[in-house]
Image (spheres, grey):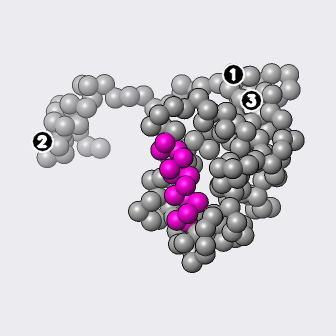
Amino acid sequence: MTDETGYAPPHWVDRGAIDDLPAPRGWLRNIHALGAVMFARREGPPSDARLNWLCREVERMNRSMKGQPNLVFRASLLAVSVVAPLLVLRLPPFRRLRFETRVRALERFERSIFGMMLFALKAILCIVWFEHPEEAKAIGFDGQCMNSSVVAEVPSDEALLSVEAAADNGGVAPGLSGVNS
């Protein structure tokens, strides 16, 4: 369900999205560089304004994270910043690489033993990115949960037991031994 502007309800997206924010500083420049690669389309990376918005939202979220989650987030970002360039034989930091080189560096980083660190960053950045009203609208998000007819039903315990019994009975469910399927 959308409101009169065609956007999802305010509790699902950042209705106060401001795209003309200043460029990020410090560790947020790495978020800006990572977001440019993650959310690029055929036309190229997103606008600096949209990436600046992403940085502001990540910074806001990061301020509320305390302790270990914050440490894991920052350590993962540092690993991408330092290790990813080395995987394409370039000097760190990641944000100083050309866009095409950053793409290659992230692909290699993702396939490396450090890939789970990137997975964690991607998960968080995607959650934030798709809170922007234009992105929510672009993917067709209407603010509602999926239609119950689309969501598969969870099998009952009896159905699960029937499947287990079929496996024990040579692939035939109890009571169906004479039925051709």
Q: Secondary structure at mark 1?
A: loop
Is residue 83 within the magenta segment? yes
Q: Does any portion of residue 66 appear in the rendered image?
A: yes
Q: Is residue 91 above or below residue 179?
A: below
Disc 2 marks a residue whose amino acid type is Asp
Q: Amino acid at mark 3?
A: Asp
Q: Nearer the viewer, residue 151 or 62?
A: 62
Q: Is residue 140 toward the left or the right of residue 108 in the image?
A: right
Count numbered badges in the picture: 3
Please indicate, yes or no, whether residue 35 appears anywhere in the rendered image: no
Find residue 113 and report its image quarter: bottom left
For the C terminus, the quadrant is top left
Tell me what residue is drawn at x 16 percent, y 33 percent: 174
Image coordinates of residue 60 in percent, x first then y, are 67, 33
Q: Residue 168 — which label? A: 2
Q: Residue furthest front?
A: 26
Tell me which corner region of the image, top left, top right, bottom left or bottom right, holds residue 42. Answer: bottom right
Which of marks 1 and 2 precedes in the sequence? 1
Residue 147: say if magenta.
Answer: no
Give the vertical position of 65 relative to 95 (above or below).
above
> Is disc 3 surrounded by few (<14), some (14 to 19) or many (20+) residues within 10 Å?
some
Q: Are marks 2 and 1 in contact (CB under 8 Å)?
A: no
Q: Tell us which disc is closer to us: 3 or 2.
A: 3
Q: Is residue 34 left or right of residue 162?
A: right
Residue range (magenta): 71-84
Front-most of residues 136 and 22: 22
Q: Which residue is mark 1?
A: 11
Q: Secondary structure at mark 3?
A: loop
> What is the secondary structure assignment of the residue under circle 2?
helix
Q: Which residue is mark 3?
A: 14
Position of the N terminus, as image quadrant, is top right
